[in-house]
Image (cartoon, rainbow, N blue to C red):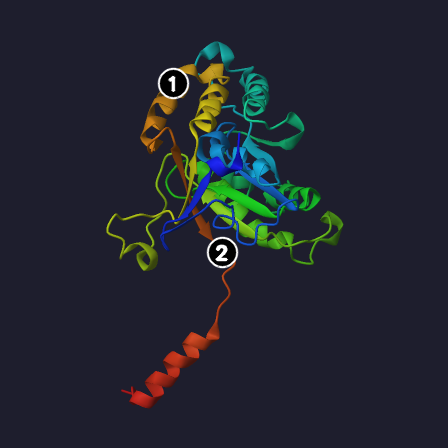
Amino acid sequence: MKREEFVVFDLRRRQKSSSLNLLFPGWQEGDERVVIFSPHDDDALLGAGYLLQAVPLFGGEVYVVVFCNGSGGYSVIEHKNVITALRARETTRAYEKVGILPERIYRLEYDDYSVWPFIGWKLTGGEEGTVKKVIPLLRRLRATRVVLPNGHREHLDHTAVFMVGAFDTPQVGDPVMADWGESAAVRSVLQYAVWSDFAFDDALCAGDDLGIRANRALLAPSWAEERIQEAMREFKTQAKIVEGLLAARKEREFRDGFFLEVYLAFDPRPKCVYEKYLRRVEEIERGGGAQ
C-alpha cells in the first residue's frame, strides 16, 4: 500500500497531484486530523472510503462520526428490536477492514430519519441538540479537516448532517463556549457524494461542457476498492441492499484497475469582500446610472 498510488484532481483548474494539497490546502503531514461525518454507519465508507484509507498514508489521522443508530435499517421484522446493537457491531467490523479502529469511531445515536429536529443547541423540549455534541467533540479531537455528506437530495439525514457540519464547523474555531474545549480553527471542509450528484452551481458549472458539479476527485488503486467491498459485506443485516450498492460501484472504475471518488470543496463561512462591491458602485457612479 503506497501513497503514490493515489492521485488527486482539481476538476475546475484541470490539475492533478500526488499530494493531498488539492483536497486539503496546506496539508501538514504529521499534524492533520480528518473527521468524516457519516449520517448512517456505511455512508463514510461508500462516499469517502478511498479518502479515509489514503489519509494515514499521507501522515494524517482519521476519525468517523456516525450520527444515526441504524434504527430504521432492519430488512426483516425479527431485527426490529435489536437492529441498533447489530449495526453497531457490524460497523466496528466494517471499519476495521479499512484500518479504522473502534476508538476512532464516535456514535451520536440519533434515530434514523430524525437528525433534522435536533439541529441546534437548546431545543424547545428542553433537550440539547447537535451543537452540544459536535463542537466539543471536534475540539477534543483537535480536528483540522472535516468531511461532510452531500447535502443535496440524497437523504433527509444526509442533508441534516451536512447542515450541522457546514454551520458548526466554523464555530469550532470561534472563542465561544470556552467550557466546551479549546477553540482551534478547522482548516478546510469537503463534501463527499454517496449516490446523488452535488447541487448545480450556476457560477461554477455553467461553463463546463460535461456539467460537472464536483470540483475535486480522488483516484484510488483497486486494493482500496476491494477493502471497501469487503467492509460493506460486514453489514449482513442489509445484505440485499449492500449487494446492489456494491454492484453500482462498478461505475467508478477508471482504467487499469483504478477507481474514482468525487468531492466538493467549499468554504462554510465565505468572507464578504467589499472591494468588488465598491468597484461596482464606482462604475455605476461614473456611468451616471441614476434614473
Q: Is residue 212 above or below residue 78?
A: below
Within the image, what quadrant is residue 136 found in? top right
Frontmost residue, 140 versus 160: 140
Identity of the amino acid at label 2? Asp
SS at mark 1? helix
Per the model, the C-alpha gap separating discs 1 and 2 is 35 Å
Q: Earlier in the sequence, mark 1 or mark 2?
A: 1
Across and down, in percent, residue 114 comes to: 50, 34
* Mark 2 crowdedness (10 Å alpha carbons): few <14, some 14-19, many ≥20: few
Q: Is residue 49 above or below residue 186?
A: above
SS at mark 2? loop
Across and down, in percent, residue 164 comes to: 53, 45
Residue 113 seen in render: no
Question: Which mark, by number, is residue 267?
Answer: 2
Identity of the amino acid at label 1? Glu
Number of marks in the rendered image: 2
Q: Residue at x 41, y 20 (%)?
A: 242
Within the image, what quadrant is residue 206 found in? bottom left
Across and down, in percent, residue 101 comes to: 63, 26
- The residue at which mark 1 appears reads as 243
Residue 83 seen in render: yes
